[in-house]
Amino acid sequence: MINTLTSLRFIFAIMVFSAHCYVIDKFFDAHFFKEGFVGVSFFFVLSGFIIAYNYQEKLRKNKITKRTFWVARIARIYPLHWLTLFIAAVLGGYVIASGTLDWLMHFFTSLTLTNAYIPQASYFFSFNSPSWSLCSEQLFYICFPFLLPLAKNYKHLLCLFGIMATLVVVGMYFTPEENIKGYWYVNPITRFPDFVAGMLLFQLYERLKNRNITSLQGSIIEIAAITLFLAFYIYADEIPKVYRYSCYYWLPIAAVLIPFSLQKGFVSRILSNRILIIGGEISYSFYLIHLFVLLSYAKWQKESSFQIDWYISIPILFCITILLSLLSYYYFEKPVNKRIKTLLNK
């Protein structure tokens, strides 16, 4: 694992957290915070990079089978997803349904991670709404072994990405405003180019990783990458939202991912801090748990006459989310992941 990229997962998870803090206070209903949804785009691109980094050669050389790969990914995403799904179902209030049969349909599509294919917010945001992104991850994992023949020659993979990117940009242009979220933000098929972009970046990483880059050069490149990303992020308010859901951020995310994967500069040394790495390790739990914490507090705040200023409540809620994520990772995710892989690989 590349430590800097693990730490970046935590940083982008915090951006997603901040994007949802508007449910607590209007202070967070500003572009700087709400644009934090870019964290999801980063996760998708990073997923393509990390999956290629960890499994491309193993699958090519038959060190592991497709089945072993798929079992590992199932064990990774499903246990915590199902746990948070059942918690949302028990708590109630996390799904809009017209009756029992409709509720069961919502539950089944969420259970099987197919809800994001239905372009209705009542489906793709039902129960634990951040889990919609797992529908995309599931599609990525299913397809990855079949993309490996293309990955043998980066030009073939680049051609595939070019075709998909063109279709995405053209399709976005002709999509009515009210449909962009269902068609372009949550739909796993239209988020597939993000994953392929990550695979392409891994090909670039393979060509650059042995280059003789000094610490000074690496530091300059890392600072330039951060500056470019921030420029895109701050200027994004001027760009139609449909493009910001994916293609607008491909370049700045790539600019961040490649330099930090090489780990040559002083910013990489900061990101290699053990605390940040642990944050990256628990980022999946953090991502799936954080909205429960925020919404539960928002509901209590609405019903209570006792009000707490956001600059006090948000840090407390953040710490609670971190604590729950640590407990989830070490006492649920890791042991259950190991148990499932043992059972399914027999």
Image: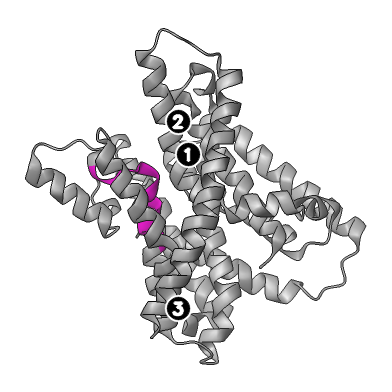
Residue 278 x/y as whole percent: 65, 53
Residue 329 x/y as whole percent: 53, 55
Viewer-nearest residue: 139 or 11: 11
Quote the CA–CA distance across marks 1 and 2.
6 Å
Q: Give the mark nearer the N terminus: 2 vs 3.
A: 3
The answer to whether residue 303 is left or right of residue 275 is: left
Residue furthest top in the image: 305
Examine the image and state in which quarter residue 262 appears.
bottom right
* Disc 3 target residue: 69
Q: Check disc 3 and report its element: helix, strand or loop.
A: helix
Q: Amino acid at mark 2?
A: Leu
Residue 320 x/y as whole percent: 54, 35
Residue at 73% over, 58% down: 260
Q: Check disc 1 and report its element: helix, strand or loop.
A: helix
Residue at 37% over, 54% down: 81
Badge 1 vs badge 2, beta-carbon distance below 8 Å: yes
Q: Which residues are magenta?
A: 123-137
